[in-house]
Amino acid sequence: MTRLRWLPLLVPLLPLVAQPSREERFRSIPDPARMRSTVERLAARPHHIGSAYGKQNADWIAAEFRSWGFDTHIETFHVLFPTPKERLLQMVVPTTFSARLAEPAIPEDLASAQQEEQLPVYNAYSTDGDVTAPLVYVNYGIPADYETLERLGISVKGCIVIARYGASWRGIKPKLAAEKGAIGCIIYSDPRDDGYFQGEVVPEGPYRNSDGAQRGSVMDMPLHPGDPLTPNIGATKDAKRITKEASGVLTKIPVLPISYGDAQPLLDALEGPVAPDAWRGALPITYRIGPGPANVRLKLSFSWDIIPIHNVIATLRGTEFPDEWIIRGNHHDAWVNGAEDPVSGMAAMMEEARAFGEMVKEGWSPKRTIVYCAWDGEEQGLLGSTEWAEEHADELKKKAVVYINSDGNGRGFLGMAGSHTLEVFINDVARDIVDPETKLSVWKREQLRRVSNARSADDRSEIRNRKDLTIGALGSGSDYTAFLQHLGIASLNLGYGGEDGGGIYHSIYDNVRWYLTYSDSSFAYGRALAQTAGTAVLRLTEAEVLPFEFKSFASTVATYADEVKKLLKTMQDETKERHRQLDDGVYTAIADPREVLIPPQRQEIPPHLNFAPLDNAVTELLTEAEQFAHAFDATKNGSSLSPAKRKELNRVLLSAERELTQPSGLPRRPWFRHLIYAPGFYTGYGVKTLPGVREAIEQRRWKEAETEIVRVAGVMEGFARQLRSARVSLLKR
């Protein structure tokens, strides 16, 4: 009774319970158990484009988004999708051998037994062909490897090449082989890179077994991604299509992926020079180059069908800025079951969207429109995202603020890449996300990883002292490509990984069993991805002033400019040194007289290039970025601006990245319009920064290099003018 009498007196003295912030509330909602359930649902059966289960998945995803309050529809496109009718790989000389070209079911892995629904092992967009020829081993099949072959006096003309996966995107291998005169290409996964050399193999471990093979597209995506028959326009049902023969993105020669179990007899039958040390894999054979005496027959034919693909588009309309869109995407299609790639990322994105739906039910509304996209056809060539972006290009250029992408997820460290105008922004997000296992911020954990991996004391000091972590530049390989490099929409690509190594990429063994055993089995990092990307979306939709920052971008571009100047100087020095060694007889003197080793050819010494336009543009960009930052700080980060001034400023900020594109695009590949970032012509997924200038120098196109210097300087000056316009607007407040 006494206690009851005193209770009213005590209550006012109790501390008030703090209400969680909006961000804290958002980050509390994503549920690992629901993510597991989503992965089990979506990856239960093979779901490649055109499959029955793929369409069922799209319908189910759409229904889930609708249940969370999103305005949702499925947008269908019609794309060219070849599937194999015939696959044959045989050794006919000096002995006979027929490749299995199959991944067998494993008793303890029930999903691997879904054989009737699985796409066979093949490379999409390989041309048809029936060729028989001597075999030549070309290592990774990249330009440097062909330079080595040249010095060894080995030509691949009229031969079939066998290359191992790695060092470059798979589509580059048949592309370069055809340029060198080869008539067929085989790609295999060597166990040194992807197999028992790395650890225990499936089913006892996570790494690729002797029967595992990597499916994948070999479309020439450095020319353009998306449907091969409708470049630059959406592949609607009635779209005007070019012929297959007129498309430049199909391979010129037939190409087929195989397992290292199928590759070993072929490689073991080769004679000729022993392969250089760097070319030797982990198979129990002596790696030789050929040509022959192994002769192989490669026969491929495909059904070239037009099929529907299904993008799920889900929208929460903004209440204050409905015509400013924050776009978030992950693809839902897979080569087979695809629990890791892409369903783990898809499950995280769906939990992120569900969290927003819960907050809407609690009374919250986004200020800017949020668009969630579940893409189809990513695996074959970024089909769904590219066709959607091309179809809605005009609207996206007006309304899209940022595109945020993910593409599968695992255990480990946060990977961040994208437009450097968003570098400061995504660093700030990462500082507020807790690593589920170490309890450090994911930012701090990544910083310490970089410190550990740094090559020098100077590098370690730079990492420790720099306020923000540098983010990587984007090339290609996932669904951000059309947004950033075709339309000039600032983009980010996010995901966790690095502690879940394995070799099931694009195989039948990428399924729920593997993911639950060897990857993010607790879905703690799936939750971290939902929290990370979702926090970014939340901050973007709520920001009074869009959080673009330009000093980091300007300094990064200045670094790129220094790199291309150093590239030219290095090429000049190396060419001069090569000429001197040729004149001195160095190559002849050190060569083993009993072996063939041809001296390298003389090349033109690279001329002086006029980098003045680039230097001037960089200086202007650095100056304007600094001055804009000062002017913005003077407005207390925009808080002192009137709503009308903030709106005016946001329109300038939204369109700034567009200034870095040109309608004419890059030389010989006009679809890629961004002059700062692009996939490399011979790297595929790998990025080339200042691509027009850099690749012109690498390819010794000196007149083109001069032209590209002027062009990239022009877009940088246009970007600087945008900043100047924004600064002047701030000063007039």
Image (tube, rainbow, N blue to C red):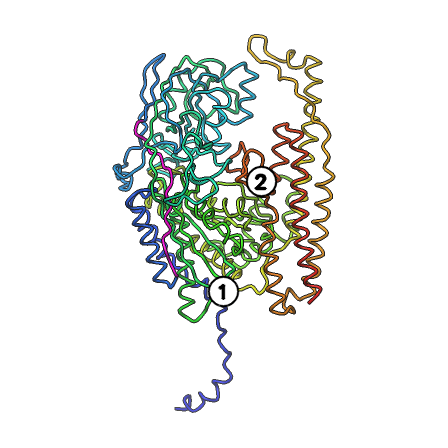
Is the residue under label 1 in contact with that under label 2 (CB below 8 Å)? no
Q: Residue at x 51, y 36 (%)?
A: 222
Labelled disc at residue 35: none
Q: Residue at x 39, y 15 (%)?
A: 294
Q: Residues within 10 Å of mark 2 (few under 14, many from 20)?
A: few
Q: Quadrant of the C terminus?
A: bottom right
Q: CA distance from mark 2 to mark 1?
A: 42 Å
Q: Taking the image as drawn, is residue 511 in sight? A: yes
Picture coordinates of residue 48 (x, y %)?
34, 42
The residue nearer to you, when weighing 259 against 683, is 683
Picture coordinates of residue 359 (x, y %)?
43, 67
Is 84 magenta? The answer is yes
Predominant SS along the magenta part? strand
Is 34 magenta? The answer is no
Q: Residue at x 64, y 64 (%)?
A: 637
Q: Secondary structure at mark 2?
A: loop
Return the residue found at the far top.
594
Q: Which residue is the site of mark 1?
A: 23
Q: Quadrant of the N terminus?
A: bottom left
The three-letter code of the residue at mark 2 reads Ser
The three-letter code of the residue at mark 1 reads Glu
Picture coordinates of residue 710 (x, y %)?
68, 39
Left or right: where does residue 715 sit relative to residue 252?
right
Labelled disc at residue 664: 2
The residue nearer to you, when weighing 639 against 28, is 639
The residue nearer to you, when weighing 85 against 421, is 85
Q: Secondary structure at mark 1?
A: helix
Q: Taking the image as drawn, is residue 461 in sight? A: no
Rendered position, 142 above or below 17: above
Rendered position, 597 above or below 69: above
Residues drawn in magenta: 71-86
